[in-house]
C-alpha cells in the first residue's frame, strides 16, 4: 500500500517537474543565428538583424509572443552552434542528407531559391565547359559544392574549390583575383554582385528549398507553429508572407514551378513508361532543359513585376498592391499616404560619373528607403530616379507628413561609392487616401508625382502635399521655363548692385551683382521667384552667361565715366561645371579687355563647391589664371573641412546671412561667426559678413575682427544708375571707424 502511494507520488513529482521545465522554457528567449546573406538575412547599417527571414520570423514571433535573442556568427559557425545546442533556431538552411541527420526541420519551405555562378569581369565563363581549371569560391558548409559536382557529373570537368567563411568573402576573393568565380544564391548575387564588380553568368545550379532548422529532436512545437503560419500564409495572396517577399524583391514560391511545366513533366513521365531506354539516354538533356525552363519562367515573371536593378516592385506590381490597399481602406476607414520621390540633380551625377555609379547610388538609396519604412509599408521604383512609397497605419495627415519628412531626412545624406562621396537630396510629393473623387491607384500616383514637381519648384529637398488648386502650376513647369527664355530674349532681366564696405574705414570696396526680373505683369521679381526652376537646366547656364556679360558691360561703362568698382557675380554649380565655362569666360574678358579681370569676382556657393571638390577646384584654378578672383558664398552652411578649404582657390569667404542675422541674440551663431573669422585668418583669406542690418551688428563684427560687410543696414541692392550717386552720399559711420 505504501509502495503504491510512493509510486503515485513519484509520478506526480515527475509531472510537476515537466510542467515547470516547460514553463521555464516558454519564458526563455529563442536564440536565433544571424549571418550575412542579404537580402535573406543580414545585419543592417544600424547593427540590427534584417532581411526577409528575420521579418518572417518576427511576424510569427509577434503572434506567438516569442522573445528572440539574435546571435551573430559566420555560416559554418552558426551550424556548429546549432548542432551543439547553443542556438535554438537557424534560418535559411537547405536540406540535404547530412543535415537531415544533424538537425530538425519543419515541413513547409520558407523560401525557394537557386544558386548561380558570378565571374570576375576578365574571366570568360559562359558555359559549364568554361569551368575547366577555374578557381571557384564557395561558402564553407553550404550545399553548393555538392550541387555543382552533381551538375558537372559526366562532363569530366576539374575545378579548384576555394572555401570562404561568408558570402561577402567569396565575392571579395573573386574581386581581388584570388578566385575566378563564386557561387551564391540568386538573391544575394542580385543584391551584392555589382558592389564587388562581378558579372552574372548563365550557369544555374539546382533549385533548393530553404527552412528554419533546430537542434535534433528539439523545439518540435516551434517548428510546428512555423509550419502552421507558412502553410496558411502561402495560400493567401495578400498575406504578410507575400508582402515581405515583395518588399525584398523575391519571387513567390508559386512562380518557381508553373502549371504548364508540371503538366510537361507528367507527360514525360508517362512517355517514359513506354520509352524507358530513350528516356535514360536523354535524361541529362531533359534535366538541363527543365532547369532552363524554370529559370526562364522566373526571369520572365521577375521582368514583368520587379525592377531589375533594385529588386523592388515596378510600376505594374506597385499599382496592383496599392489598389488592393485602397480597397481595404474603403472598408476599414484606414488612412493611406502615397509619396512620390525624385532625386535632385541625379541626371548631373549620371552624366558626370557614368551610369554604373548612378546605378550603384540608386541601389544604395533603395536599401536606405527600405530600412527606413515600417514592415507593412510598400516601396517601389517606377523608373529612373523615381521611387513610390505607400504608408499605412497613420494617425492623421500630420503623422503622415512627419513620417515623410523623416524619410526624406534619412535619404538626404552622403553616400560612399568606393572612393567617391556623393551628397544626395530628394523632392517628395504627397497625397492621401480616401478621397471623394479618386478611385484608382494610377490617379493617386499621378497626384503624388504632380506634388513632387511642386516641391522642386519651391526649392527642392522638401515635401509638398498635393493640392488640386495648385495642380495647374505643376503642369506649367515647362511653360515657366519657356517664359523665362522669352523674358531673356526680350531683355526683361536687369542687374541690381549691393555695395560692400569696410566698416573700419568706411571705404566702398565693391558691389555684388544681383539679378532681377522686370516681369511685365508681375512687376520686379527677386531671384527666388524664378532661379529654382532653372536648376539643372541648360537655360541656367544661358542666363548665367548673360549676367557675366551684362556685369562686364556695366563695369566698362562705369570705368569710361571715371568710376571704378570691383563687381562680384554669382555663378551656379551647373553653369560653373559646363565643359566650356572657362573658354566662354576667357572670350568675354577678351571682348571687354579694357576691364581689369582682377576687378571681377565670381561667387560660388559653398554647398555647390562641396559636391565635387576635385572638379570644382580644377575649374576655379583655370579661371583664376585669367585673372579673376573667387569667393565662397554662404560659407558655414556646407560643412567644409579644412582640407576642402585648402584645395579651393577662393580668396574671400562670405559668412552666410543666417548666422549674422541672429548674431546679437544667439551665442552659437556668434561662436560660429567668430570661428569662421579665425579660420579665414589662419588660411590668409579675407572674410565678409552678409546680412548686416543694424549698427549693433557692425559693432560686434568689428569687435570679432570682421571689417568687410554688406546688408540692408548699409544699402539695399540698387540699379546701376543709382550706385554712383549713392557712393557720393555715403559718409563714414563714425561708430564703425577706428
Image (cartoon, rainbow, N blue to C red):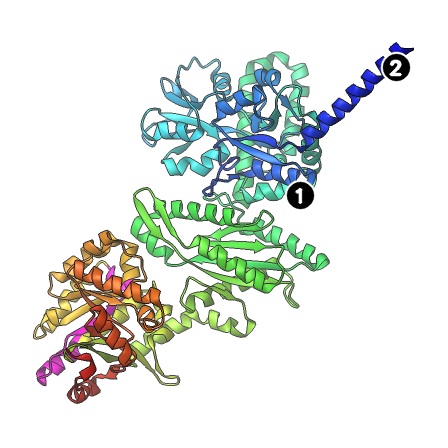
Q: Is residue 199 depicted above or below 381 in this figure?
A: above
- Which residue lies at the image location 29% right of the left edge and 75% below the top edge? 691
- Which residue lies at the image location 63% right of the left edge and 30% below the top edge? 109
Q: In this figure, which residue is indicated by the disc labeled 1?
A: 239
Residue 130: where, in percent of width, then height? 38, 22
Please state if 604 lies on the left or on the right of 384 as rendered: left
Please state if 556 lies on the left or on the right of 407 as rendered: left
Which of the two discs, 1 and 2, labels the residue nearer the N terminus?
2
Q: Is residue 100 depicted above or below 386 in this figure?
A: above
Q: In this figure, which residue is indicated by the disc labeled 2?
A: 5
Residue 314: where, in percent of width, then height? 53, 49
The residue stretch that appears in magenta: 552-578
Residue 46: where, in percent of width, then height? 47, 43
Query: Looking at the figure, which quarter contains the N terminus?
Result: top right
Mark 1, secondary structure of its residue: loop
Q: Quadrant of residue 139?
A: top left
- Asked if residue 486 is among those painted magenta in the image, a careful observer would answer no
Amino acid at each position: 500500500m505504501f509502495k503504491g502511494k510512493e509510486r503515485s507520488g513519484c509520478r506526480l513529482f515527475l509531472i510537476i517537474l515537466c510542467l515547470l521545465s516547460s514553463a521555464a522554457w516558454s519564458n526563455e528567449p529563442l536564440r536565433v543565428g544571424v549571418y550575412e546573406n542579404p537580402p535573406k538575412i543580414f545585419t543592417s547599417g544600424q547593427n540590427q538583424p534584417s532581411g526577409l527571414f528575420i521579418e518572417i520570423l518576427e511576424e510569427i514571433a509577434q503572434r506567438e509572443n516569442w522573445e528572440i535573442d539574435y546571435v551573430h556568427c559566420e555560416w559554418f559557425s552558426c551550424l556548429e552552434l546549432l548542432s551543439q545546442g547553443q542556438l535554438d533556431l537557424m534560418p535559411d538552411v537547405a536540406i540535404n542528407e547530412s543535415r537531415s541527420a544533424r538537425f530538425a526541420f519543419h515541413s513547409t519551405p520558407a523560401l525557394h531559391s537557386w544558386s548561380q555562378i558570378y565571374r570576375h569581369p576578365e574571366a570568360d565563363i559562359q558555359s559549364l565547359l568554361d569551368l575547366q581549371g577555374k578557381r571557384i569560391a564557395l561558402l564553407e558548409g553550404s550545399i553548393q559544392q555538392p550541387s555543382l559536382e552533381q551538375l558537372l557529373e559526366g562532363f569530366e570537368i576539374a575545378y579548384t574549390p576555394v572555401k570562404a567563411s561568408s558570402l561577402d568573402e567569396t565575392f571579395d576573393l573573386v574581386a581581388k583575383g584570388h578566385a575566378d568565380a563564386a557561387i551564391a544564391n540568386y538573391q544575394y548575387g542580385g543584391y551584392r554582385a555589382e558592389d564587388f564588380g562581378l558579372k552574372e553568368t548563365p550557369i544555374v545550379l539546382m533549385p533548393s528549398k530553404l527552412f528554419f532548422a533546430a537542434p535534433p529532436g528539439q523545439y518540435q512545437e516551434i517548428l510546428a507553429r512555423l509550419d502552421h503560419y507558412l502553410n496558411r500564409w502561402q495560400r493567401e495572396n495578400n498575406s504578410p508572407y507575400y508582402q515581405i517577399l515583395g518588399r525584398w524583391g523575391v519571387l513567390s514560391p508559386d512562380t518557381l514551378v508553373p502549371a504548364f511545366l508540371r503538366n510537361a513533366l507528367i507527360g514525360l513521365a508517362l512517355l517514359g513508361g513506354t520509352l524507358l531506354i530513350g528516356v535514360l539516354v536523354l535524361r541529362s538533356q531533359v534535366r538541363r532543359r527543365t532547369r532552363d525552363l524554370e529559370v526562364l519562367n522566373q526571369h520572365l515573371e521577375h521582368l514583368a513585376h520587379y525592377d531589375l536593378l533594385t529588386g523592388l516592385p515596378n510600376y505594374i506590381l506597385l499599382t496592383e498592391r496599392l489598389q488592393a490597399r485602397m480597397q481595404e481602406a474603403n472598408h476599414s476607414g484606414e488612412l493611406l499616404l502615397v509619396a512620390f520621390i525624385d532625386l535632385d540633380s541625379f541626371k548631373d551625377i549620371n552624366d558626370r560619373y557614368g551610369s554604373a555609379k548612378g546605378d550603384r547610388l540608386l541601389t544604395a538609396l533603395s536599401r536606405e528607403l527600405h530600412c527606413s519604412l515600417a514592415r507593412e509599408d510598400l516601396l517601389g521604383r517606377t523608373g529612373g530616379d523615381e521611387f513610390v512609397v505607400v504608408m499605412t497605419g497613420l494617425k492623421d495627415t500630420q503623422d503622415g507628413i512627419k513620417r515623410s519628412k523623416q524619410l526624406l531626412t534619412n535619404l538626404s545624406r552622403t553616400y560612399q561609392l568606393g572612393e567617391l562621396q556623393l551628397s544626395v537630396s530628394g523632392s517628395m510629393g504627397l497625397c492621401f487616401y480616401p478621397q471623394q473623387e479618386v478611385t484608382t491607384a494610377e490617379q493617386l500616383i499621378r497626384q503624388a508625382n504632380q506634388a513632387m514637381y511642386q516641391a522642386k519648384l519651391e526649392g527642392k529637398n522638401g515635401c509638398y502635399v498635393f493640392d488640386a488648386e495648385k495642380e495647374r502650376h505643376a503642369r506649367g513647369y515647362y511653360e515657366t521655363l519657356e517664359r523665362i527664355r522669352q523674358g531673356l530674349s526680350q531683355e526683361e532681366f536687369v542687374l541690381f548692385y549691393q555695395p560692400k564696405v569696410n566698416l573700419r574705414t568706411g571705404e566702398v570696396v565693391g558691389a555684388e551683382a544681383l539679378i532681377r526680373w522686370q516681369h511685365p505683369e508681375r512687376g520686379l521679381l527677386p531671384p527666388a521667384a524664378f532661379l529654382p526652376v532653372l536648376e539643372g537646366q541648360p537655360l541656367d547656364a544661358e542666363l548665367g552667361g548673360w549676367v557675366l556679360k551684362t556685369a562686364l558691360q556695366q563695369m566698362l561703362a562705369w570705368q569710361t565715366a571715371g568710376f571704378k568698382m570691383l563687381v562680384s557675380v554669382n555663378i551656379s554649380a551647373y553653369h560653373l561645371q559646363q565643359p566650356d565655362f572657362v573658354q566662354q569666360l576667357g572670350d568675354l574678358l577678351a571682348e571687354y579687355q579694357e576691364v581689369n579681370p582682377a576687378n571681377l569676382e565670381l561667387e560660388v556657393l559653398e554647398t555647390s563647391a562641396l559636391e565635387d571638390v576635385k572638379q570644382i577646384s580644377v575649374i576655379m584654378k583655370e579661371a583664376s589664371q585669367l585673372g579673376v578672383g573667387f569667393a565662397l558664398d554662404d560659407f558655414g552652411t556646407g560643412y567644409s573641412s579644412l582640407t576642402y578649404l585648402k584645395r579651393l582657390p577662393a580668396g574671400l569667404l562670405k559668412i552666410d546671412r543666417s548666422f549674422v542675422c541672429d548674431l546679437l541674440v544667439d551665442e552659437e551663431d556668434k561662436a560660429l561667426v567668430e570661428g569662421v573669422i579665425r579660420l579665414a585668418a589662419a588660411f590668409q583669406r579675407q572674410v565678409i559678413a552678409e546680412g548686416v542690418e543694424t549698427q549693433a551688428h557692425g559693432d560686434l563684427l568689428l569687435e570679432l575682427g570682421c571689417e568687410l560687410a554688406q546688408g540692408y543696414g548699409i544699402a539695399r541692392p540698387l540699379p546701376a544708375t543709382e550706385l554712383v550717386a549713392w557712393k557720393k552720399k555715403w559718409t563714414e559711420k563714425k561708430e564703425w571707424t577706428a
